[in-house]
Each structure stands twice: as C-alpha cells, then as structure tokens.
Amino acid sequence: MKRIASILLALVLIISFTACGNSSDEKADGSDSINNVTQGNQNIANSDGKILIAYFAEAENSEVDAVASPSVVTIDGKTVGRMRALADMIQNETGGDLFSIQTSVDYPADIGDLIDYAAEEQNNNVRPELTSHIKNLDEYDMIFVGYPNWWYDMPMVMYSFFDEYDFSGKTIIPFNSHNGSRFSSTIGTIAELEPNATVITDGFTVNERDVEDSADDIAKWLEGLGY
C-alpha cells in the first residue's frame, strides 16, 4: 500500500509541474492575464463596420529613398517596405482601407544606426510626433495594426499611435515582422494601452526574411479568423 501511495504522489507532482510549465508558456506574450484579449477562433469577419489596416513601415519614414533601405522587399516588380507589403496582402484578402502611420522622425537607413536609434528611443521613452491622422475612425470596427519588432517591443511611434486613438469597442488584430523575436510581449502591451478594445492574440507574425513569400500564409491565417 505504501508503494502504491508513493507512486500516486509522484504522479500528482508530475502533473503539477506540467501544469506550471504550460502556464508559463501561456504567459509568454504577457497577455493571458488581461481581460480584453481573445484567441482568434471567433469569426471576426461578421461585422457591419469597415476594416482599417494601419501599419508602420520604417521605409516610409526614412531619411533616404525607400528603394535604398534594407527594410524593403520587391513584390511583382514593386519595391515597398516590409510592413506595407504585409498590409497589401491583408488588403487583397479583406478589402480594408490602408493607413500609413507617419512620423516627423527620419529614421536612419543604415540597419546598424537604426538599431541604435531604436534602442535610444526606448531608453528615453520617446513619443515621436505623428504626421498622419485617421479622420474617420468611427467608421471602422476592425483595425489591423502592423509594425516591426525592435528590441523585443513595438517602435515607439506605435505608442504615439495608441496614445492618440481610443479604440474602445473595436477589434484590434496585430501583425508584425521580426528577426527571431516574433511578437515578444507586444500583444499584451497593446491590450494594456487599449483596455476597452478586443485584442486578438492570434496575430500574424513572420520573419522579415520571409515577408515576400507570405501571401499564402496570410490567406490561411485570415481564413482561420473567418475570412
């Protein structure tokens, strides 16, 4: 009997440790404890409102011509910023309106300088000035929001973006490009910045080297969201 009891106790401990491990995985993006995040299994296509696809592309906010920037890709002979390319793919599937998040900052074209600049912005908690503005936000129910991942976070201009707009009652669907860090904790951050919006955790994330070949993956992702 003692041996059986010992075996049962061991099984209980194993199950307990496994549960703790799963809980840690769920908290990886920092969003599971926030009330306004939701998995992407709901059918978000059933909406009467319009769709907005807002994106920040450093190539459209650079101190040099976009063609010379390392943050661009060429698709069907057209050279665009990586985030613009992903936004175009989403638009092709959803018919949403595009909105480019513009700032007064001219970001460095050199990738090394850009990395240093992004780190300095984060360290100083900078809020870059926005020079483009959504004039008809009330018309939109769903907001796709796209951004690159810099230093495991959104570019600071995205904080300016969320500071400017109140997305209460709307659904936010993130998409991003990265160099290995995926979303990091940015979805949870968005949920904190927009506590009265519904934030979809099943966003689309892709390594920046694979952006050009993402059209089919985006179509499948959107199909899973109800498109």
Image: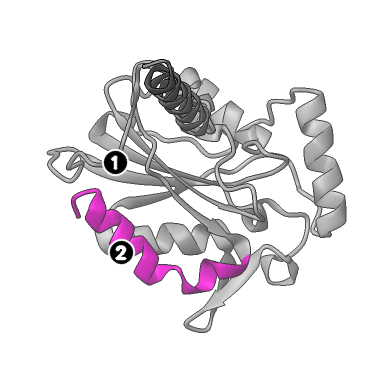
Kindly indicate the quadrant of the structure image that contains residue 72. bottom right
- Position of residue 81 relative to residue 190, above or below, is below
Q: Which residue is pictured at 20% across the width and 39% down the height?
A: 42
Inter-mark Cα distance, 2 to 1? 14 Å
User: Which residue is more in the foreground, 11 or 155?
Assistant: 11
| Secondary-structure class at tag 2 | helix
Q: Residues within 10 Å of mark 1 (few under 14, many from 20)?
A: some
Horizontal relation, residue 45 to residue 103: left or right: left
Q: Amino acid at mark 1?
A: Gly
- Which type of secondary structure does the marked residue at label 1 adopt? loop
Q: Nearer the viewer, mark 2 or mark 1?
A: 1
The numbered mark, 2 or 1, whose residue comes first in the sequence reads 1
Residue 227 location (% of width, % of height): 20, 55
Circle 1 sits on which residue?
A: 40
Q: Position of residue 22 (x, y in %)?
A: 46, 32
191 sits to left or right of 137: right
> Which residue is under mark 2?
219
